Image (tube, rainbow, N blue to C red):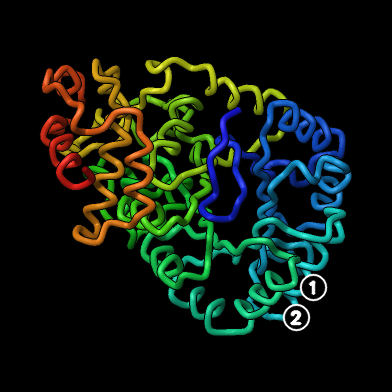
Amino acid sequence: MQYRKIGNTGMSASIIGFGGEHLDRKPYEDVKNTVDAVSEYGVNMLDCFMPGEEIRKNLGMALGEKRKDFIIQGHLCSTDINQQYDISRDLPVVKKYFENLLKYLRTDYIDIGMMFFIDSDRDFDKVFHTGILTYAQNLKKQGVIRSLGASSHNPITAKKVVETGEIELLLFSVNPAFDMTPAQNNALDLLEDKIDVTAYSGIRPDRLELYRLCEQKGIAITTMKTLGAGKLLSAAHTPFKKPLSVTQCIHYALTRPAVVSTLIGFKSRADVEAAIRYLDATDEERDYSGVINDIKNDFTGHCVYCGHCQPCPADIDIAAVNKYLDIALLDEGAVPPSVISHYKSLAAAGSDCIDCKSCEERCPFGVDITGRMQKAARLFE
């Protein structure tokens, strides 16, 4: 397993994470087998937003002494009033369900307390301008929550959350179809076949800006809907001309700036093993560029960090240099020290480019790679 640092929290997340949603209403044996499988493969990132008593109890029993090996994202505001999934911004109800989460998971702390489902200005106000944020902050002061996070599906609202400076991690819906969906549309409608991404062109700037902003500010991203609820894997339901593989979906998410872990909805050992195969996949198996480029688009000239340009004879990690350059250009003239540090930790720099242009011959998007290597050298070196 590979691990990435979660900002400045001191924690490191497995790049493949465990979303427990699909284990809801499954028998304990299924939960136990799945937890055992992720543990064996070194998966340590676990998201538990599910509000039901049964699934929380089953997870708690299955984790047992393994709880200390997991980083748990536990959510505030996720409830199941009358056994129906719901979102509450009523503080006493929020407290009740969070306290139950601790009880049922058999733990006295949650690694990352997630303020749940902030998708609109109204959601933002209900969380940040009421007692909910204060409650979360107090839990952190007491050590009951070790870090604060939030979840969102809307890049504009998510950016607003990030800019408060209150969170250290963002759970966000990331996949190529969502990234082509305008912010004014509900990306979740894609899962109901209400949006055709082929009507749009390229990755939306507001979504890419969010990823770059998070990287710039040291805010980690964990991803939900990485597989688009399975639709991206299905020839019958994908919005593209052909389906993506699990490996391609995971690689797409992991090549977005700031992403540390892709949360996959496991419900069996087989699901876990399908995702784990990513670790041994070849560059060709990981490459998603052919699928997302096979539609009307305006990707031309823009790096999407797909890695199709590799290998570089000068051993430059071209996608990483481009990523740090894009982040720096968000606020040119005041490049964050962390971004400079990341760039300088690379084994080879932009100045090592020998201008052979072999990368440009392989780039599906016509990026001026050698020019960008020179720009990175000027900016960072």
Instruction: Name the residue nearer the viewer: 201 or 376.
Output: 376
Disc assigned to residue 92: 2
Q: Quadrant of residue 303?
A: top left
Residue at coordinates 45% horizontally, 37% vertically from top-left? 254
Residue type beneath disc 2: Pro
Q: Is residue 47 above or below residue 284?
A: below
Disc assigned to residue 16: none
Residue at coordinates 33% horizontally, 40% vertically from top-left? 344
Instruction: Name the residue nearer the viewer: 180 or 42.
Output: 42
Tell me residue 150's x, y (percent): 55, 62
Q: Quadrant of residue 355?
A: top left
Q: Secondary structure at mark 1?
A: helix
In the drawing, does residue 143 fall left or right of residue 175?
right
CA separation in Å, label 2 and label 1: 6 Å
Residue at coordinates 44% horizontally, 45% vertically from top-left? 174
How many neighbours does mark 1 have within 10 angstroms: few (below 14), some (14-19), or many (20 or more)? few
Instruction: Name the residue nearer the viewer: 149 or 178.
Output: 149
- Residue annotated with mark 1: 96
How many neighbours does mark 2 have within 10 angstroms: few (below 14), some (14-19), or many (20 or more)? few
Residue type beneath disc 1: Lys
Tell me residue 380's x, y (percent): 23, 45
Viewer can see residue 242: yes
Callout 2 touching callout 1 (CB < 8 Å): yes
Residue at coordinates 14% horizontally, 41% vertically from top-left? 375
Q: Secondary structure at mark 2?
A: helix
Viewer can see residue 200: no
